Image (cartoon, grey):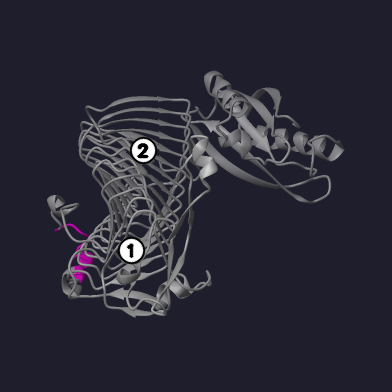
Amino acid sequence: MTTRLLPSACVAFGLTFLQAKAETLRVPEQHGTIQAAIEVAGAGDTILVAAGTYRERIRLKPGLTVRSEGDDTKGKIGLLRSEATILDHPEGKGPGVEMAEGATLDGFTVTGVGNYDEALWQHHFDTRGAEQPHEAIGAEGVPGIAVTATCVVRNNIVHHIGYTGIAITDGSPRVEGNVTYRNMGGGIGSMNGSTATIEGNHCFENFYAGIGCEESSPLIRANDCHDNIRAGIGVSEGSSPRVTGNRCVKNRRAGIGVRTGETTRPILEDNECLENGMAGIGVEEEAHAEIRGNRLVDNRLVAIGVNDGSSAVIEGNDLSRKGGVPPLIGVLEGSEAVIRDNTLHGGGIAGIVVKGTAEISGNRFVTPAPKKLVFPFKGASVTDMGNWLLTDVTFRSNLDGSEQRYVELLPAGASEGEVRDVVLAFHGHGSDRWQFARDPRGECRGVREAAAKYGLILVSPDYRAKTSWMGPAAEADVVQIIAELKQRHHIGRVFLAGGSMG
């Protein structure tokens, strides 16, 4: 780094300026090792590292950028430059990389830190992590990349480490676009009160969770976590992260697992959890979770499980499973949940099983639904009101033979011979038949709540035209829909409700 004092005239006005010109240092062209370049570099400088394998572990300095040479062309699992620029020093001491305040590490493979045990990994993968002691998770160790400050860790590949791939223990760093796999801890771990942003990472086949947090509150967003031995994302020990927009698939235990204590209070929203070995989302050991807008499909046990004295708000989720005995939602002894405005496809012995306490309202059970929508065990406390049976109906127009569709919401528990009024809800411009069936915004929820309060059948058709429900063809469809409803139900009055263009 070159430093230059500006003319003394500036000093005369009480202003002292330092102007620094950032430099670029090249390895190995100018410096034989990365660490040698780090030692002579200063804040604001960039070290560009050519492709190759470097037998060293490095310790960054504040404000320094260390980057692999090349562009952002994709390779097999990460960036091509990340795959070609490797830090591998099995005989070294300390982390593969130790970060510093304001520093950036961009585009390296980090491996050869600690002992990766293939036989132990395979044993616990085969047993779905059931024999892993909880106290070992998050214990101290030597990571591939140690993050102890506010800094940036991006585009790196961290694998076959004897501990966690990337361990965050302080600060508010950005950890983004990394690949972590086959590490003997988690892929990425957030601990000790850190408040990281963990975004766009790919974490798979790690010994514990793909991403885990203990006593920390990171933002965990848009990550892909699959085939990890424990959860795709694990939250524990007083953590309160926001977990949003992630994809957790085929993890050996839960897609997202929440546990250990009432101070563990994550917000889980808009995530996808598919085909995981236990629950899609599991909450246990007195933890609390806000679970909203998630899509949980074909998880081996429940879509959402709340047990062991835990609590949850479960709202606006889409839950489904083909076959199997377990319910889609289970609230077990000593636990409690508010379950509202969810859509449930399938289920085993019931859609929702309650052994604890639950308030269940405004949920939609898609037909064909389980024989029992809600199954309270003896001793359970259940408030069950305003739930629906949902049928997505296709019909052939009598007017022109075209295929048209509508959604029918029938109050759950309706008597077969009971006369029911109908409200036909016409959705707004740019939406479809599902708007009034499940959209959380005011006018849609308001129509559902009014229909539930008065026991109405709610029907929401698709547009006949591209931009409006108006016109003779649309009116003919409405007449046909009413006639079909009268064939299936005892219909009284018919009301109309509309969105902005309905």
Question: Which residue: 47% across, 64% down?
Answer: 23
> Circle 2 sits on which residue?
352
Q: Nearer the viewer, residue 37 or 466?
A: 37
Position above or below: 434 against 252: above
Specify few, some or many for label 2: CA neighbours under 10 Å numbering under 14, 14-19, or 20 or more: many
Q: Position of residue 26 (x, y in %)?
A: 43, 73
Q: Give the left or right position of residue 461, taking residue 267 as reference.
A: right
Indicate the quadrant where residue 483 lies.
top right
Question: Which residue: 46% across, 37% down?
Answer: 342
Question: Which residue: 54% across, 42% down?
Answer: 9
> Circle 1 sits on which residue?
227
Q: Which residues are magenta?
A: 121-131
Question: Considering the numbered disc 2 on the image, is that residue within a helix, a strand or a loop?
Answer: strand
Q: Nearer the viewer, residue 85 or 164?
A: 85
In reply to whether residue 470 is colored magenta, the answer given is no
| The N terminus - image quarter | bottom left
Q: Position of residue 456 (x, y in %)?
A: 59, 24
Specify few, some or many for label 1: CA neighbours under 10 Å numbering under 14, 14-19, or 20 or more: many
Question: Which residue: 48% across, 33% down?
Answer: 341
Q: Which mark is residue 314?
A: none
Cα gap from disc 1 to disc 2, whole angstroms: 27 Å
In the picture as drawn, the residue positioned furthest to the top comes out as 454
